[in-house]
Structure formats: structure tokens, C-alpha cells
Amino acid sequence: MPSPISSQNVVWHDSIKLRFGFTGLDEEDATRIVRRIITKSFPSSLRYTGQCLYVARLRGVVAVAYGDRFSPVLYIGEGNAKNRFYEHAPWLARLLLSVPNLEIELHVAEVKRQNNTDLCEYVEADMIHWFREEYGYLPWFNQQRESSKEGYYEYMPDTEKKLRALISVGSGNTFLWAIRPTHNNSDAWTPYSKNSHE
């Protein structure tokens, strides 16, 4: 059995906050602004750019409806976070445009262990599994589980606590609204509706 994953293996950096304080943008301009914020705010201290874990969460009073539960989690991912955020910019921008005063926070960690460059894939798989266990859904914009990589590692208690905190409602948060897409919004409805049956 491999050694447990510790806080030395999962190093968190400053999060990136996305919010529009104005209205009237079209989707193309909004996407450009999101990409600019990501580029400007991306943690410069991050060294292992291809070995990242990240979680996109809502902030404020709005969460996502997952059945009769709610959570601020939108997406859990791994890989080159900066490139992936750049790819996610269109749906991030659409969501920010659709819900005025919404704020999205992108949490980024380097996942590193000597001679193990794919460790982030296992941590991501466990986080998605934990989320699915808790809410009965995959996070809104996740398309699939990585069942073959779930449960392979154990975690030191403080490390697991931090990872689970990022997929929970979080202490001190008071969500007053829970949103979900309608079937009229096919770009967002398709992944959302599929994830309840994954």
C-alpha cells in the first residue's frame, strides 16, 4: 500500500475570484474578461503546472441545487489548471452573466510526489467520489467519474479534512438560493441532468 497523501503532497495556493460588477456584456467579451482575470490572478508561485488539482465553487448567497440538497461546488478537475481554466472560461462567463452579482472562486493546488506525476488524478477521483456519495450527483460540470482511481490512496487526517472542506458547504456560508439550469439551456442542462444518473 502506498504511503498516505499528506499536506506536503497537496499544496494550496491563493484562489482566483471571478465576478462582474457590471452588466451589459456579451458572452464573447465576458469570456475575454474571465480569461484576463485568470491570467492576471493565477498563482505565480506554482511550479508543477501540469500536476494541479482545482475546485470551482460559488461564493455569496447562491449555491447549486443537487436534488433536495445544495452545494457551492461547480467542478472538480486536475491537470494544467491555467490551461484548463482558459478552456472553462466560456461556461464560467455564461454563468456569471446569467446570475447577476454571482462570484466564482477557483481553488488551485499542486499535487506532487517524487516519481509520481499522476497523483493529482487519484486525488481528483477521490474528491469526485466523495461529492457523489454526499449529494447523489457529480458536480455540475464534471462529465464522468474516474472509478478505477478511487480509493487507491489513504490521506493524512488534516489533508483529507481540507479536501473534504472544499467540496462541502463550508462553515460560515449562508446560501439563500439554489440554482439549476432548465432544459431550455441545453449547454448547461445536458451535463447537469446527466450527472444525477452517473
Image: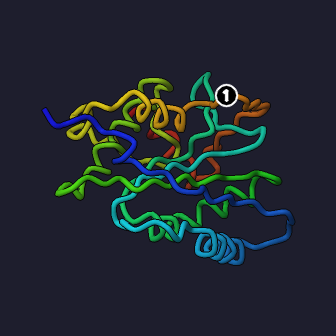
Q: Nearer the viewer, residue 43 or 75?
A: 43
- Give residue 77's position: percent from left, percent from top: 42, 52
- Judged left or right of residue 147, residue 24 is right
Quadrant of residue 160 within the rendered picture: top left
- Give residue 17's position: percent from left, percent from top: 68, 58
Residue 122 to residue 1: above or below: below
Q: Amino acid at mark 1?
A: Ser
- Judged left or right of residue 51, residue 42 is right
Q: Nearer the viewer, residue 131 or 114?
A: 114
Q: Is residue 190 visible in the rendered structure shown here?
A: no
Quarter in which the C terminus is drawn: top left
What colour scheme has been applied to the protein in the rendered image? rainbow
- Judged left or right of residue 56, residue 129 is left
Q: Is residue 8 visible in the rendered structure shown here?
A: yes
Residue 184 to residue 32: above or below: above
- Give residue 64's position: percent from left, percent from top: 64, 37
Q: Write the residue at 49% across / 40% down.
A: 139
Q: Nearer the viewer, residue 195 or 43?
A: 43
Quarter in which the N terminus is drawn: top left
Residue 96 to residue 7: above or below: below
Pick out the residue farthest to the left.
1
- Judged left or right of residue 136, residue 144 is left
Q: Nearer the viewer, residue 87 or 160?
A: 160
Q: Write the residue at 49% across / 35% down.
A: 162
Q: Residue tagged by mark 1?
A: 171
Q: Write the residue at 41% across / 29% down.
A: 130
- Give residue 158's position: percent from left, percent from top: 44, 31
Q: Write the residue at 49% across / 67% down.
A: 45
Quadrant of residue 153 within the rendered picture: top left
Q: Residues within 10 Å of mark 1 (few under 14, many from 20)?
A: few
Judged from the image, the secondary structure of the residue bearing numbered disc 1 is: loop
Pick out the residue farthest to the front.
8
